[in-house]
């Protein structure tokens, strides 16, 4: 099969197109013919070494074992079954839950042995991938590309919303709202949980699209009066912030939160370290949450909402699998709206 491997930490030149044998499914696994694989920050940060504090970088302490096929947002068709797998799975169109874990139900994401497809396992930048049958879910939409944009971004956003126990009528600020996680945070908070959503983006050119997805107001982070604008539009401080930006908007987030407000972060594209005056936290009684991925139960709930039309795919552009370097380079550019998807030529 044709695949794209990461051969070491570094720039996009570490991505190599190779011809290798397709995997053989083990007992309890299926072989999936990959039809689409969306790009996430996860595989880019893995390649760049951004997750580790040393040369090791991955979801596990031992770091990534190279070469590794990245890619975690995968849809495809089951074409081969390992021993012990139900024959009814053959030919099914599936979307992959992105990690294995020995953690108990609804706490799988907290287990120390959580291992991620595309980091600890070979992933979807390939024509075929093998994966446990019980981690393959029916696609929520008929289209492979549209169904591929939700796995990691959607699960991350869903869990962020669940962490904050968002209630109908609350005002939620969503940063990075034009990206994969951010655009889904807008939709989940507004269309599933009934919140009033204030979206923050760089460029207001997609304001109408974000409002169609559920945002009440859209702001540019380039405004020198951003915090004041948000508080004025809400008639006071907001209930919660769903953040994927990090340092660049951290001060604004704390400024706009009400006393007893909640802040949840699951990304730091705008800076991984920040200055924090602890007095802001305790004087405003702010609760802070870190969030990574989520549970199988949440994944199933998310897929149900997609099938019901409450969440819409947001796709910026597709690339052929062989152009993974160009796709990851494009992914890091500003001004995009939605997901970038790789499509194998099979």
Image: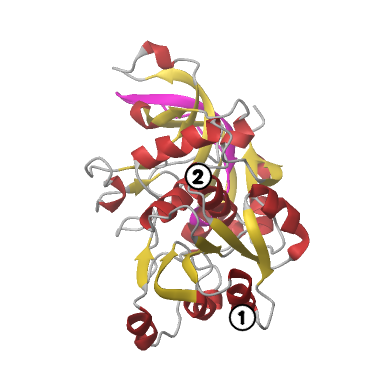
Quarter in which the N terminus is drawn = top right
Q: Position of residue 43 (x, y in %)?
A: 50, 53
In which quadrant of the rendered view does residue 4 lie?
A: top right
Q: Which residue corresponds to mark 1?
A: 228
Q: Which residue corresponds to mark 2?
A: 192
In which quadrant of the rendered view does residue 179 lie?
A: bottom right
* Highlighted magenta segment, given as a residue range: 18-42
Give the answer, above or below, for where 54 lies relative to 344.
Answer: below
- Is label 2 in a helix, a strand or a loop? helix
Give the answer, above or below, for where 335 lies relative to 279.
Answer: above
Classify residue 332 as left or right of residue 112: right
In which quadrant of the rendered view does residue 147 lie?
A: top right
Whether label 2 touches label 1, CB < 8 Å: no
Q: Is residue 297 visible?
A: yes
Compare residues 74 and 13 and report the one nearer the observer: 74
Dot 1 crowding, Cα within 10 Å, few <14, some 14–19, many 20+: some
Residue furthest to the right in view is 205
Classify residue 94 as left or right of residue 205: left
């Amino acid at each position: 099969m044709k695949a794209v491997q990461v051969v070491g930490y570094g720039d996009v030149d570490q991505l190599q197109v190779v011809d290798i044998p397709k995997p053989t499914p083990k007992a309890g696994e299926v072989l999936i013919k990959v039809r689409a694989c969306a790009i996430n920050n996860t595989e880019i940060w893995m390649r760049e070494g951004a997750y580790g504090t040393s040369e090791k970088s991955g979801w596990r302490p031992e770091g990534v074992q190279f070469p590794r096929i990245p890619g975690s947002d995968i849809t495809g068709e089951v074409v081969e079954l390992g021993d012990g797998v139900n024959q009814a799975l053959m030919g099914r169109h599936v979307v992959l839950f992105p990690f294995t874990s020995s953690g108990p139900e609804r706490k799988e994401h907290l287990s120390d042995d959580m291992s991620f497809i595309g980091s600890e396992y070979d992933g979807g930048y390939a024509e075929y991938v093998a994966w446990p049958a019980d981690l393959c879910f029916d696609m929520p939409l008929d289209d492979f590309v549209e169904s591929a944009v939700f796995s990691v971004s959607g699960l991350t956003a869903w869990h962020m919303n669940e962490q904050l126990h968002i209630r109908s009528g609350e005002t939620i600020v969503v940063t990075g709202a034009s990206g994969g996680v951010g655009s889904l945070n807008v939709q989940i908070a507004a269309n599933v949980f009934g919140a009033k959503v204030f979206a923050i983006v760089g460029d207001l050119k997609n304001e109408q699209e974000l409002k169609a997805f559920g945002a009440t107001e859209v702001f540019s982070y380039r405004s020198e009066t951003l915090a004041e604008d948000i508080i004025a539009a809400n008639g006071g401080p907001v209930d919660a912030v769903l953040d994927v930006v990090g340092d660049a908007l951290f001060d604004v987030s704390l400024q706009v939160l009400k006393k007893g407000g909640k802040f949840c972060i699951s990304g730091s594209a705008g800076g991984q370290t920040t200055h924090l005056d602890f007095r802001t936290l305790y004087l405003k009684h702010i609760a802070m949450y870190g969030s990574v991925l989520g549970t199988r139960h949440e994944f199933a709930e998310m897929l149900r909402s997609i099938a019901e039309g409450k969440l819409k795919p947001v796709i910026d552009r597709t690339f052929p699998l062989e152009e993974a370097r160009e796709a990851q380079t494009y992914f890091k550019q500003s001004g995009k709206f939605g997901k970038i998807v790789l499509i194998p030529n099979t």
